[in-house]
Amino acid sequence: VVARALVNGVLTLTLNRPDKLNAANDALLLELTKALRDAERDADARVIVITGAGRGFCAGQDLGDVSGRSMGFAEHLEHTYNPLIRKIRGIEKPVITAVNGVAAGAGASLALSGDIRLWSSAATFIEVFSNIALVPDSGSTYFLPRLVGYHRAFELMSLAERVNAEDGLRLGLCEHVFPAETFAADVQAYAERLATRPVRALGLTKRALNKALSGTLDDALTYEAHLQQAAGTHAEHQEGLQAFREKRAPDFRNL
Ligand code: LHQ
């Protein structure tokens, strides 16, 4: 239910239940988390793209699948959704969520969880949870107010209105919108450009940003210094310095 393709340093993981708008069942969530764990150890996977097959990105929990229900809601979340979101934010490689179509419920949380969010002009976003009288989960209560503020987040969650790509870009729910017709190619080109960057240093940058979001300036300064020690003693930094001196583009691959 998750297809993998590795092209020019870009590992694309495609949710593949198109007839249900890639609604998530346990198999899909566990497989996606496992694919990210594998990617962590795969030096050829420099940038990871998560996208959906067909006209949906992810419609959230598959409401026809009750396999998780025997566990209770909290346990189900801790077993499936939470490890996925933690892995996306924790993996020390850039993760792009490429939102090709509707992102609803936990699918909307997934869309927000990427380090870079690229939307198709056909993408839509719904904090749909309140339609079935549930609380936003899988990180939506963390991500959304940081992007749009408390009040807009509460309104989006309360009314469950569908946000289109134009409004998503205006609200800061994504970094770029690409035309639906060329979306896959535009995402691949963007991801390949990112894959030429020093992805190990970017992984440490990701760690620093995620920690800083929940800490003080003082903590951030200390953590930056600690991570800079790791970045500054790595071959990527040597290559960057040498390329600067030689007035050429750096080549960070295979370091
Ligand atoms: C679906 C789904 C779906 C199954 C569309 N399931 N089939 C975590 C842990 C524990 C418990 C509960 O929740 C969570 C987290 C959550 O994610 S809760 C939120 C769950 N998701 C939803 O409530 C979304 C339900 N879907 C919708 O509101 C709409 O389908 C959206 C807005 C996503 C798309 O609307 P349309 O573009 O109009 O498409 P559609 O409604 O016609 O859907 C197409 C097909 O996909 C349809 O099947 P059919 O056989 O009639 O073609 C839908 O039944 C199926 N589908 N979402 N979540």
Image (cartoon, grey):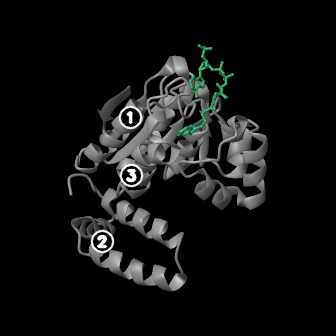
Task: State the image coordinates of residue 104 (x, y, percent, origin top left).
Answer: 62, 35
Amino acid type for the residue under numbered disc 1: Leu
State the residue at coordinates (29%, 47%).
Answer: 37
Quarter of the figure with residue 238: bottom left
Mark 3 closeness class: few <14, some 14–19, many ≥20 residues within 10 Å: some
Residue situated in front as seen by the camera: 152 or 26: 26
Task: State the image coordinates of residue 34 (x, y, percent, origin top left).
Answer: 31, 41
Q: According to the image, label 2 marks what residue? A: 231
> In this figure, what is the number of numbered marks?
3
| Label 2 vs 1, first from the N-terminus | 1
Element at badge 1?
A: strand
Q: According to the image, label 3 marks what residue? A: 87
Q: According to the image, label 1 marks what residue? A: 13
For ligand 1, which image quadrant applies? top right
Label 1 and label 3: CA atoms lie apart by: 14 Å
- Quarter occupied by the N terminus: top left
Label 2 and label 1: CA atoms lie apart by: 28 Å
Foreground mark, 2 or 1, reads: 1
